[in-house]
Structures are given as structure tokens and as C-alpha cells.
Amino acid sequence: MNATHKDYFNDLLENKAVILQPGEGEKTGLGGFSCTFKVTSELSGNRLGIYEITLPPHTIGANLHYHRYMDEAFIINKGVLTIQLADKMVEVAAGGVAYAPRFTPHGFRNNSVEPVTLTLIFNPSENREGFFYGLIETLSEQPVDPQKYLKLYHKYDSFPVDTENMLPVK
């Protein structure tokens, strides 16, 4: 008989909570765009990613795309975010929520003259932080290489609906 005894009847409780106050978290960005990592893939075992995004005025966050394995939710904290769906644009004001389950074509942008701040949630997250680092690197290069951008997209479960109109530039 094994000398180690396992308890099959009681839960093992552990304090693994993480609290991030406003302004806390690792931040990356380019120009007026910023992304602050709140709950990372590493913290959640790839089950959840929560990111605070700031989009400057008249900025495309992402053109129409979909995910095969992730759901994406947007919680608008400040300003008005324009969500693109397959057949329409919808403005979502502060306090509003938009949910794009997997296989739902969606995009988002700030069409206003004020910055937009939102909380972006991915479930599962699948190392989404790598996507944001790669995005900053790719968009920093001029001209932007569409093939490099597409490779990044595919690696992180993002599939543009129209590869001719996938780059987030006007």
C-alpha cells in the first residue's frame, strides 16, 4: 500500500488571487494606442486574458476578423467604441458590453474625437500577450508587411474576413 494518503473528499483551498489597481499591470503600446496586461495567460493557465486597451481618436483596433477557439468580450470604460459586425457598425457607449463568440466576424475602432478605453477579455487567452507584442513590432515597421501581419494573426487564432482589408490602417 502507498504510504502517501490523498484526500479525495475535500477541496484544497489556496489563495491565488491577484489584485491590480488602476494603472497597474505591464503596459505596451505604439503612438497613442496602449495595452495593459491585467490578467495574463500565465496567471490563468491560458484560460483567461484581461487587457485594458486605449485607442486614440480615429484609430482602427482591428478590421473584420473572427476567432476559431476564443470568445472575445469588450467592456467600454470611457468613450464610444464602434463595433463592426458582418453587416453593420454599432456604437457602444461607456458602460456597454459587446460579446463576440468564436466564429463571429467582428472588428472595432474609435471613430470619435476622444480616446476610448476598454477592457478586452479573451476566453481562453492562449498566450494573447504574444499577439500584442507582435502587433506592436509589426505595426512599427514601415511599410507594414501584410504577410508578417497575417502570420501573427494566424498564430494567435485570428482570421481576417478579407485579407485585402486586414491591416488596421486607414
Image (cartoon, grey):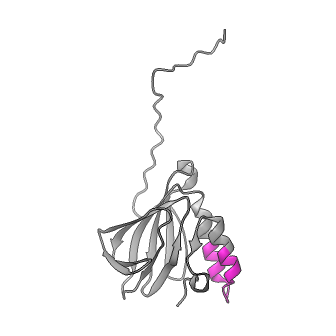
Which residue occupies the foreground of this view, 1 or 70? 70
Give yes or no for residue 13 being in the magenta stretch: no
User: Which portion, as a residue range, is magenta?
Assistant: 134-150
Which residue occupies the foreground of this view, 13 or 162? 162
Please count the marks in the image.
0
Which residue occupies the foreground of this view, 43 or 92? 92
Q: Is residue 160 left or right of residue 51?
A: right
What x and y, as percent, mark residue 154? 64, 68
What x and y, as percent, mark residue 9? 46, 20
Point 47% across, 34% down: residue? 14
158, above or below 2, in the image: below
Please identify the quadrant where the N terminus is shown. Answer: top right
What x and y, as percent, mark residue 125? 54, 57
Q: Is residue 70 left or right of residue 23?
A: right
Point 51% across, 21% down: residue? 8
Q: Residue furthest top?
A: 1
Q: Is residue 59 left or right of residue 41?
A: left
Give yes or no for residue 140 being in the magenta stretch: yes
Which residue occupies the foreground of this view, 141 or 91? 91
114, above or below 120, in the image: below
Specify the principal SS of the magenta part. helix
Point 61% across, 86% down: residue? 164
What x and y, as percent, mark residue 19? 42, 51
Point 50% across, 54% down: residue? 48
Snapshot quadrant of residue 79 = bottom left
